[in-house]
Image: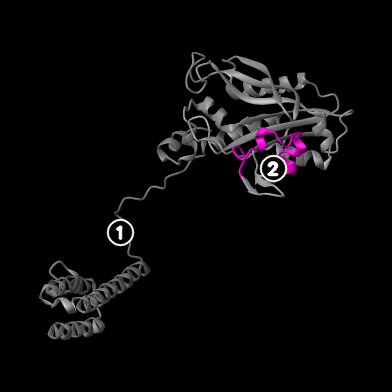
Amino acid sequence: MEQIVQQIEAYKQEIAAFRPENAEALEQYRIRFLGTKGLVKALFGEMKNVPNERKKEFGQVLNAFKVLAESRYEEFQQLKDEAGSATGQLDLTLPGEPHRLGTRHPISLVRNKAIRIFERLGFTIAEGPEIENDWHNFTALNLAENHPARDMQDTFYVHNNPDWLLRTHTSSVQVRAMEEGKLPIRIICPGRVYRNETISARAHCFFHQIEGLYIAENVSFADLKQTLYYFVQEFFGENFKVRFRPSFFPFTEPSAEMDISCLICGGEGCNVCKHTGWVEILGCGMVHPQVLENCGIDSNKYTGFAFGMGIERLTMLKYQIKDLRLFSENDARFLKQFQGTV
């Protein structure tokens, strides 16, 4: 073993003194020390001849020698590459490397289209924080303390007493706009929201909303219906049916849900519409007077309407996508299908 260790020391000195003059000399170094029949591999083959009590010691010597040989080679290889780049060695006969152009995400496409439609009606964009306090997310919107939406199963709380949470809707942005008191208000509030739901083809723990709010004098439910009729016709076209169903929301009164005939199955029934032929696309209603008072607005003088819709659901209907999870899986095979979409 001592003889082999002496040989290794000699090889180390050889490596330290090595200075390749060209690429061929560097390749010869690689073959001599690191090749399949090189010295490093041959020395490791001597391990079987070393007594068991000295194998650990000998293994440490071999590993240090291997690291030295490899690091020296990589050092000279890097210097060679840098020198080649510095001298501008470029093979002009090689084919060019194509630059793959990306595309907008389908959620962004639908969001931007919806915004353009509402902008034509005079709505402006309002934004707010994704981490909200209890007042703006719940209390100001007339949600009692025992309302199911406050349950930990529905909401991601990040702090308790005082309560801070990931917003469950962009209605909190509407509250902030009403508190400013600059009337009339005509805004849309696009953004990401979070709910503690089981992930499936129809639901996710986060999704995107676009909510609208219009407050002025003499605003009626007829104004709300006409606004939403205009939106769905501009967004989907005219080959579908629309219906309003009475509903309940703590922050609107009266309240309704708006359905359209399923564009994926043509109203015949599928997993997206739960085999009913209808798909709910938004909830809406007249702003509850208590919400107006909570935000410092005179409910005897002003009225307003509000609505909210999920952007994922609009996207699924528009592009006939049957699984909501595709939007967040970053599968290039799915996303590249929207390259030609404007």
Q: Is residue 200 left or right of residue 289?
A: left
Check residue 127 in the rendering and tell me which mark sits there, or answer none.
2
User: Foreground residue, 332 or 279?
Assistant: 279
Q: Mark 1 points at which residue?
A: 91
The mark closer to the camera, 2 or 1, is 2
In contact (CB < 8 Å): disc 2 and disc 1: no
Per the image, label 1 sits on a secondary structure element best described as loop
Which percent across, then down, holds residue 284?
A: 70, 25
Given residues 86 and 65, the one toward you in this image is 65
Count the marks: how many?
2
Instruction: Identify the magenta region.
Output: 133-156
Residue 180 higher or lower than 59, as above or below: above
User: At numbered mark 2, what does the secondary structure look like: helix, strand or loop?
Assistant: loop
Amino acid bearing label 2: Glu
Q: What residue sits 77% from the left and 40% below the top?
A: 177
The N terminus - image quarter: bottom left
Q: Residue 281 versus residue 26: which sits nearer the camera?
A: 281
Q: Which mark is residue 252?
A: none
Q: Nearer the viewer, residue 159 or 127?
A: 159
| Nearer-N-terminus badge (2/1) | 1
Crowding at dot 2, Cα within 10 Å, few <14 / some 14-19 / many 20+, comes out as some
